[in-house]
């Protein structure tokens, strides 16, 4: 379909959002997203299994979850749930479907978006896991 026939309408946000990001703070993609949202005036909180990163703006609040990878994806859910209930985000965005996606699901927070890209970046984890496990996934366009 030609690009000219697509129209994307984004909701107008009348106030800054409180956004929680759940992902690897050492990832350039996570850093860009956290810093970009903060620069646009949103209240950004970044939860990661890694220690705080100097690549993240001081305006972004960073939280280190316990245990580290890979066990933290399963064991840090209580700490993530407590932090998220205190933060009360309007939106929780998670990166990396299998690790942080699992942690987001186990945290019990309802409104979660999962970032998957179509390039060789974040979508690779999802596809690699599907291929290695032999599972079949239904995709939606």
Image (cartoon, rainbow, N blue to C red):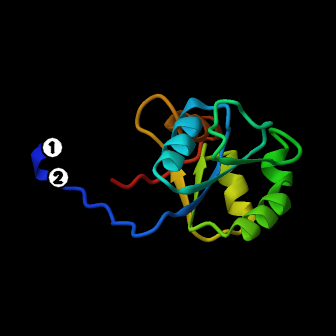
Q: Is residue 32 left or right of residue 103?
A: left
Q: Is residue 21 left or right of residue 13?
A: right
For mark 1, give the secondary structure. helix
**Residue 121 at what x, y percent from top left?**
50, 31
**Residue 39 at what x, y percent from top left?**
49, 45
Disc 1 to disc 2, C-alpha distance: 5 Å
**Residue 136 at what x, y percent from top left?**
52, 48
Pointer 1 local density, CA inside 10 Å: few below 14, some 14–19, many at least 20: few
- Which of 111/11 is in front? 11
Question: Are discs 1 and 2 less than 8 Å apart at CB?
Answer: yes
Relative vertical location of residue 54 with respect to residue 82 in this rendering, above or below? above
- Which of 78/74 is in front? 78
Relative vertical location of residue 75 with respect to residue 31 in this rendering, above or below? below
Any mark on residue 3, and which? 1
Tell me the quadrant of the picture where the N terminus can be found.
top left
Pointer 2 local density, CA inside 10 Å: few below 14, some 14–19, many at least 20: few
- Which of 55/74 is in front? 55
**Residue 28 at what x, y percent from top left?**
57, 30
Residue 134: name its quadrant: top right
Image point 89% across, 44% down: which residue?
67
Asked whether the viewer can see residue 16, the reply is: yes
Residue 34: name its quadrant: top right
Any mark on residue 102, and which? none
Relative vertical location of residue 121 with respect to residue 92 in this rendering, above or below? above
Q: Outermost residue, right direction?
A: 67
Image point 33% across, 66% down: which residue?
12
Any mark on residue 6, and which? 2
């Amino acid at each position: 379909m030609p690009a000219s026939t697509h129209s994307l309408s984004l909701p107008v946000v009348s106030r800054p959002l409180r956004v929680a990001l759940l992902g690897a703070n050492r990832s350039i993609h996570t850093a860009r997203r956290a810093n970009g949202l903060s620069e646009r005036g949103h209240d950004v909180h970044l939860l990661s299994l890694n220690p705080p990163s100097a690549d993240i703006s001081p305006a972004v609040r960073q939280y280190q979850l316990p245990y580290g990878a890979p066990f933290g994806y399963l064991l840090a859910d209580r700490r993530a749930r407590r932090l998220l209930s205190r933060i009360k985000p309007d939106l929780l965005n998670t990166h990396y479907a299998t690790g942080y996606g699992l942690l987001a699901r186990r945290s019990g927070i309802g409104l979660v978006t999962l970032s998957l890209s179509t390039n060789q970046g974040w979508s690779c984890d999802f596809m690699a896991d599907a291929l290695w496990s032999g599972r079949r996934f239904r995709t939606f366009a």
